């Protein structure tokens, strides 16, 4: 099957190492029903979480270039591991040099906007320390690689230095979710990671970010393991709200609502399309037909 061309219509690229980004993709489609998307999952090289930074950066650039080649001039990296590794670098060096008219955005900053309640684009001064109130304590659960980069710690410190951040690597989870290991197998791992996180703290975190796009599938297991007062945040809706604001500010990346062609989403994979299509429904909530891309 040939990959449809969108011609003059703006189409937004969504890149992920595999299927996790579908949890973001479904929120984007729901929140922005007039937009068209091309989703590219690099299943042939997933998971990224335990790879070297150079590998992840190279694979991410290749995925983005593929989406550019298919006509997307805006790409969202719907993978924390990829965004944490090289988004800043590619935005500051690679993109302006090679594709000055194109844009790549990630899913870390939208989450920080949501926690601080401050839109990033405001270029406002960092959030002041809260007078007298104890500073917010945010826990970040993510892949080993995302934790190693410290991307959430750095980005939160820039915006809201008073917020305290604790991180917990959960190295087994993305692969177990990909392998459809089932709740009974995954539950003890989630409990052990949460226990490890809490044992290192003097107080219970106020908020826990599930900073891997696979984890919404096991949000209920994190809910079980965390104390009830901890607020859990996932990235789908937060990213969709941020993208909506972005498109309002940059309408050239948005399909005109009056456009003749109905909005469409195309799903591409570097892996085996039959296998990927068979598992994608767990992430997406409905059947999705992937096409292979060499
Ligand atoms: N879903 C990816 C993320 O958000 C992790 C999966 C992987 O390791 O490739 O970090």
Image (cartoon, helix red, strand yellow):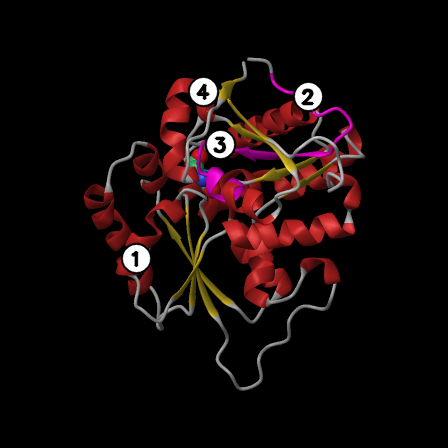
Classify 10 Å Cα crowding around label 3: few (below 14), some (14-19), many (20 and above): many
Residue indicated by mark 2: 5
Q: CA distance from mark 2 to mark 1?
A: 45 Å
Task: Provide residue 260's location: percent of width, then percent of height.
Answer: 74, 32
Residue indicated by mark 4: 271
Task: Provide residue 36's location: percent of width, then percent of height.
Answer: 64, 35
- Helix, strand or loop status at disc 3: loop
Residue indicated by mark 1: 194
Q: CA distance from mark 4 to mark 3?
A: 10 Å
- Helix, strand or loop status at disc 1: helix
Query: Which image quadrant for residue 145?
Result: top left
Considering the image in quadrants, where does the C terminus appear? top right
Residue indicated by mark 3: 17
Residue at x-position 59% and y-position 13%: 2
Of labels 3 and 2, the one closer to you: 2
Q: How many marks?
A: 4
Q: Is residue 11 magenta?
A: yes
Of labels 1 and 3, the one closer to you: 3
Q: Earlier in the sequence, mark 3 or mark 2?
A: 2
Note whether residue 79 is visible: no
Q: Which residues make up the magenta segment?
A: 3-25
């Amino acid at each position: 099957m040939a990959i449809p061309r969108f011609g003059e219509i703006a189409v937004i690229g969504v890149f992920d190492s595999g299927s996790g980004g579908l949890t973001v993709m479904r929120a984007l489609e729901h929140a922005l029903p007039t937009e068209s998307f091309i989703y590219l999952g690099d299943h042939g090289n997933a998971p990224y979480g335990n790879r070297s930074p150079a590998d992840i950066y190279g694979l991410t650039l290749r995925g983005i270039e593929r989406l550019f080649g298919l006509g997307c001039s805006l790409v969202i990296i719907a993978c924390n591991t990829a965004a944490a590794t090289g988004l800043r670098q590619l935005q500051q060096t690679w993109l302006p040099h090679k594709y000055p008219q194109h844009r790549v955005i990630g899913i870390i900053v939208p989450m920080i906007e949501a926690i601080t309640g401050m839109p990033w684009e405001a270029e406002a001064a960092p959030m002041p320390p809260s007078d007298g109130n104890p500073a917010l304590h945010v826990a970040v659960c993510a892949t080993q690689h995302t934790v190693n980069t410290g991307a959430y710690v750095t980005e939160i410190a820039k915006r809201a230095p008073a917020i305290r951040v604790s991180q917990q690597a959960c190295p087994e989870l993305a692969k177990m979710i990909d392998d459809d290991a089932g709740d009974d197998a995954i539950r003890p791992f989630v409990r052990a990671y949460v226990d490890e996180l809490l044992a290192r703290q003097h107080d219970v975190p106020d908020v826990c970010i599930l900073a891997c796009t696979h984890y919404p599938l096991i949000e209920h297991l994190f809910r079980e393991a965390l104390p009830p007062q901890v607020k859990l945040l996932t990235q789908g809706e937060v990213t969709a709200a941020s993208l909506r604001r972005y498109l309002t500010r940059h309408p050239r990346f948005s399909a005109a609502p009056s456009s003749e062609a109905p909005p469409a989403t195309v799903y591409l994979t570097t892996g085996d399309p039959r296998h990927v299509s068979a598992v994608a429904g767990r992430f997406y909530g409905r059947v999705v037909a992937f096409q292979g891309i060499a």
